[in-house]
Amino acid sequence: MELKEYLDYLVDFLKDYLKKANADGYVLGVSGGVDSAVCAQLIKRACGDNCLGLILPCYSEPTDTEDAILACKAANLEFKTISLNDNFDIFKKLLISSFKVENNSNSLMTFANLKARLRMLTLYATAQLKRYLVIGTDNLAEYYVGYFTKHGDGACDILPLVRLTKTEVTEAARILGVPEKIINKRPTAGLIESSYDELELGFSYKDLDAFLRKQEIDPRIRAKIEQMHKNSAHKRALAPRPKPFRP
């Protein structure tokens, strides 16, 4: 199947799932990156005006908000911008006052993931108000190694891009008319200042995509990818359940 044909299938997939769920539309967190920009194009094609983009800056780079607006406009997607700065400050202050919080890598990731979880709360509250479903933006590469926040950007009702590598998502963006500025943007989760996906992963998306296509890559990188997949298994699974109380 050609990629363009697969994208047509994804539009029908989104339409069909909406009917099965008896929901009215989709809500999408738009980050300014290529994955959410592709999702914006898909949901607009799938349900017309019954979809909404939420731009949720939380001490984010201003250029990310600008790119998110650009992505929504390119898709002709209705959008709203809601700053989460004040909410983040309240939760951070609460945690610091309640626990002995040391300034280390663990606290850095705790507060980075807090941003993603505040966005999740906003998306799901909006979805319930409008009888919408929440779109997840993770692609196959991110999903395989668990490069998402559990109960943050990993929380969603449907994952349209989860069978596509990062390279394929970029190709899809060009087919769908995503602006080149967004396509050529260096991928970042936007949770830690001056950090980028490939720096945090420790390898390139090119290597990760090659691994997923079962191509030869540096054995050290292969081992790291396999270990990340193993360590993040809990992110892709339901919570463990004990054996039944009654036979």
Image (cartoon, rainbow, N blue to C red):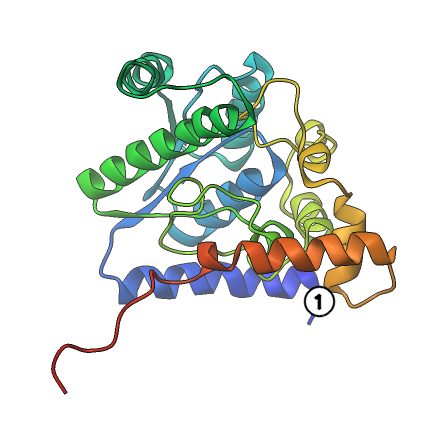
Taking the spot 38% from the left edge, 47% from the top edge, the residue there is: 155
Which part of the image, by quadrant, shows the C terminus?
bottom left
Res. 241 image quadrant? bottom left
Q: Secondary structure at mark 1?
A: loop
Q: Is residue 3 left or right of residue 210?
A: left
Res. 22 image quadrant? bottom left
Front residue of 134 and 14 = 134
Q: Is residue 214 left or right of residue 85?
A: right
**Which residue occupies the extreme front position in the image?**
100
Q: Position of residue 191 (x, y in %)?
A: 53, 26
Q: Amino acid at mark 1?
A: Glu
The answer to whether residue 30 shows anywhere in this view is yes
Q: Position of residue 17 (x, y in %)?
A: 35, 63
> Compared with residue 148, is residue 55 higher up or lower down, i.e. above or below?
above
Which part of the image, by quadrant, shows the N terminus?
bottom right
| Crowd rating for badge 1 (residues with CA inside 10 Å; few <14, some 14–19, many 20+) | few
Front residue of 47 and 114 = 114
> Compared with residue 147, is residue 211 higher up or lower down, i.e. above or below?
below
Q: Position of residue 207 (x, y in %)?
A: 80, 51
Front residue of 139 and 41 = 139
Residue for badge 1:
2
Taking the spot 42% from the left edge, 59% from the top edge, the residue there is: 14
The answer to whether residue 83 shows anywhere in this view is no
Q: Is residue 24 left or right of residue 61?
A: left
Q: Position of residue 213 (x, y in %)?
A: 76, 65
Taking the spot 21% from the left edge, 41% from the top edge, the residue there is: 130
Q: Is residue 236 left or right of residue 99?
A: right
Front residue of 218 and 20 = 218
